[in-house]
Image: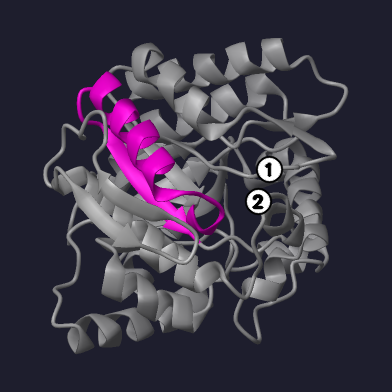
């Protein structure tokens, strides 16, 4: 079996009443700790109009992270690519790759929230076409000097980026997807499918077969790096872990349900409004070091995932609890998982 890497997801979402300057400094503290503890990457997602939550935007966050955490990879995980123009994203993320010395991961997905599509002057109906042509344009801008391309919402006329990424031919492209058609698209256009945190693990395991069949259709090998996002929390006992994280994790998934995330999920696993005990079942990695070790090994064996991006803080989770969980994951679970596989 392939060795398992662990990354850290910093959503950076907090209640309205929080002091965001203080919260940002705390996020940088977590990133620096992840860097010291041997996490593989730090991930920042991207949403707009996130009320009732506050959130620092992805690209300035990653730019700050490049200096604060000099060893970890920087995962733009994910960019809502359908909302944007390719020249802008190509230049912004090439800049992050240069600033960080070639540590960027380019994560992309369609998006699902109507408020975001309307705000950016587009529609859900247009999102797949925009997503695919944006990616083609960005890859061309990163690898060619003068690009001529007319898309549905842009025109590149002898266009070139002001700088190109350090990584050649481009940073790794992780494609996030929930539904089966999107997973087949990930196999076609991406370097790997970036498996999501929302679906149950039994759903993910079934969808891995969908992904492998699509790779075979497109004559592509199984990627060496196969990442998955999961909600993770470690404490001395499962009861203690649930006491520290259960309420705030439930709040986050209540917001996902209100935003309509489950509408993008496959039939039979498309309700994030469940009671917490049922929601957590076969979905979250929570418990003592031994329990989380067993859960990680089981996840790896069922799905092949070998890069686990762990979300360990949700709106309202105390910073001290998150830091304790990070340390326990790194110092107790990392070595046990390595030994187990």
Q: Earlier in the sequence, mark 2 or mark 1?
A: 1
Query: What segment carries the magenta color?
Result: 81-109
User: In this view of the protein, can residue 50 be seen by the observer?
Assistant: yes
Q: Is residue 228 left or right of residue 19?
A: left
Of the 4 image quadrants, the one containing the N terminus is bottom left
Residue 171 point in image, percent of width and height: 23, 44
User: In this view of the protein, can residue 100 be seen by the observer?
Assistant: no
Residue 139 point in image, percent of width and height: 24, 53
Q: Which numbered mark, 2 or 1, is in the foreground of this view?
A: 2
In terms of image quadrants, where is residue 71? top left
Q: Which residue is mark 1?
A: 48
- Residue drawn at 33 percent across, 51 percent down: 156
Numbered label attached to residue 120: 2
- Residue 140 or residue 218, whichever sits in front: 140
Numbered label attached to residue 168: none
205 falls in the magenta region:
no
């Amino acid at each position: 079996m392939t060795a398992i890497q662990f990354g850290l997801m910093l959503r950076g979402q907090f209640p309205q009443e929080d002091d965001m300057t203080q919260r940002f400094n705390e996020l940088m503290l977590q990133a620096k700790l992840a860097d010291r503890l041997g996490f593989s990457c730090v991930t920042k997602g991207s949403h707009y109009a996130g009320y009732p939550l506050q959130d620092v935007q992805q690209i300035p966050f990653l730019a700050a992270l490049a200096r604060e955490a000099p060893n970890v990879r920087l995962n733009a995980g994910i960019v809502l690519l359908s909302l944007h123009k390719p020249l802008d994203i190509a230049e912004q993320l090439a800049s992050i790759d240069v600033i960080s010395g070639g540590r960027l991961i380019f994560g992309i997905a369609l998006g699902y929230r109507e408020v975001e599509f309307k705000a950016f002057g587009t529609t859900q109906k247009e999102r797949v076409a925009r997503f695919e042509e944006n990616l083609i344009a960005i890859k061309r801008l990163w690898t060619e000097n003068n690009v001529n391309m007319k898309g549905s919402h842009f025109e590149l006329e002898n266009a070139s980026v002001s700088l190109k990424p350090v990584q050649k031919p481009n940073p790794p492209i992780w494609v996030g997807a929930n539904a089966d058609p999107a997973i087949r698209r990930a196999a076609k256009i991406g370097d790997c499918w970036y498996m999501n945190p929302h679906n149950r693990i039994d759903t993910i395991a079934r969808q891995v077969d969908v992904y492998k069949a699509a790779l075979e259709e497109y004559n592509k090998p199984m990627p060496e790096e196969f990442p998955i996002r999961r909600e993770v929390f470690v404490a001395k006992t499962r009861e203690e872990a649930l006491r520290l994280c259960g309420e705030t994790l439930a709040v986050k998934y209540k917001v996902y349900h209100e935003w309509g995330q489950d509408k993008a999920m496959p039939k039979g696993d498309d309700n994030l409004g469940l009671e917490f005990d049922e929601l957590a079942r076969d979905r979250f990695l929570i418990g003592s070091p031994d329990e989380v070790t067993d859960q990680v090994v089981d996840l790896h064996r069922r799905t092949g995932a070998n890069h686990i991006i762990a979300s360990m803080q949700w709106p309202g989770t105390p910073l001290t609890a998150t830091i304790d969980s990070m340390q326990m994951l790194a110092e107790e679970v990392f070595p046990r998982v390595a030994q187990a596989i």
